[in-house]
Amino acid sequence: MKQVLDKIAEYRREFEEELKKVDAFKSFEDLRVKYLGRKGGILKSLLDLLKTVDKKDRPVLGQEINRFKIFVEQALKDLEESLSRKKAELEEKKRFFDISLPGFPLLEGGKHPLTITRRLIEDIFIAMGYDVASGPEVESDWYNFEALGIPKTHPARDTQDTFYISDDVVLRTHTSNVQIHVMKTRKPPFKVIMPGRVYRKDADITHSPMFHQIEGLVVGENVTFQDLKGTLEIFLKRLFGKNARLRLRPSFFPFTEPSAEVDVSCIMCGGEGCRVCKGSGWLEILGAGMVDPVVFENVGYDPEKVSGFAFGLGVERIAMLKFGISDIRLFFDNDIRFLRQFG
C-alpha cells in the first residue's frame, strides 16, 4: 500500500513540474493524454495497479487515486482556460488597427518596354497630325497580299513564311492590310498610322513568330517623296535626338514605287563606326516608299488625282536600339528581372 501511495505522490510532483512548462495547446494536449488517456494514461495504470493490492487496502487507495484524478482534471481545466485567454488576446492584438498610421502602398505594375516604345512612336505621329487605325489580325489573302500588289509567286506567300488558316485566310504578315481597309473606307486627304501584332515564321535572337509593327500612310493631292523624307527626318530626330541623321537607300517593295530602305546614324557611336553598326556608322531602321498606283486602283482611287507615301517599322527593332537589347526573345520571356528595369 505504501508503495502505491508513494507512486501517487511522485506522479503528482511530476505533473506539477510538467504543468509549468506547458505554453501551447499542443503540449497541453500531450500532457492531458499522458495522465488521463484511456489506453496508456498514468491514471489508467494506477487503477490497474489497484487491482493487485489487498482488498482491505483498496478503499483507501481508491480515494487517493480519485483525489489525484480530480486534482489533475482541475489543473488541466484551469490551464486550458488560461491558454484560451492568451490566444484570444494575441488574436485581438493582430486584429488591432491603428487608423492614425499611414496606409500601405499599393504595388503597381510597370509598362512593358514594347508598350513604352509603341506609345512613344504613336505620340510623335499624333503630334504631327496622324490618326491611329487598327485592323484584323486574321486576314483574307486579298487584303494581306493581293490588294497590295504582291503576286502569288512572291516568296512571302509561301507556307514556310506565312501562317495560313485556310487557302485564302492568313495571320497577317504586316499591318499593311490596314492600309487597304483605311483606303476602302476613307476619302483623301488623310494621314494615319497603324500599330499592331503581325506573324511570320521566323524565330531567332532578332526575329519572333509574333512581333509588332507600326505602318504609316499619307494620301492626298501632290504628296511627294520629299514629303516622305521630311516626315521621316522629323520622326527620327524626335525619336533618337536632334543629332540623328537620315539616309535613304534604293530598295524594292511590291506596294511602293519608288521604294527605299531608311537608315539612321548609329545611336551608339554617333555615326563614327562601332560594333553595333558593324563599323558603317548607320543602322537600318525601316522601309518606305511612294504608294504604287496599282494599290490605288485596287481600292478605287484615281492615281492620276492622288498620290501618297507609306512606311513601316518594327517596334521591337526600335526598342532594341533605344534600350540596347540584343535578344528579341527577352521581350516575351516575362522575366521580372528584365521587365523591372523599365519601371
Image (spheres, rainbow, N blue to C red):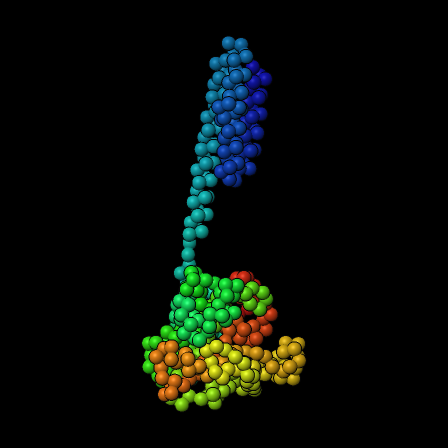
> Is residue 238 positioned above or below 195 on the image?
below
Q: Nearer the viewer, residue 112 or 33?
A: 112
Q: Is residue 142 above or below residue 45?
A: below
Residue 171: image quadrant is bottom left
Image point 53% across, 20% down: which residue? 45
- The residue lying furthest to the top in this view is 55
Nearest the eye: 17 or 103: 103
To which quarter of the image does residue 17 belong?
top right
> Number of labelled discs?
0
Q: Position of residue 343 (x, y in %)?
A: 51, 69
* Residue 40 shows in the view: yes
Given residues 332 and 53, the one toward you in this image is 332
From this view, report whether residue 155 is shown above or below residue 82: below
Front in this rendered view, residue 191 or 114 = 191
Where is residue 278? Give x, y as percent: 65, 77
Q: Can the viewer see residue 115?
A: no
Residue 124 point in image, percent of width and height: 45, 81
The residue drawn where x is 43% and y is 70% is 144
Q: Position of residue 88 (x, y in %)?
A: 43, 45
Image quadrant occupied by the N terminus: top right
Report whether 218 appears left or right of 250: left
Q: Residue at x 44, y 89 (%)?
A: 224
Query: What residue sits 42% from the left and 82% below the top?
Result: 293
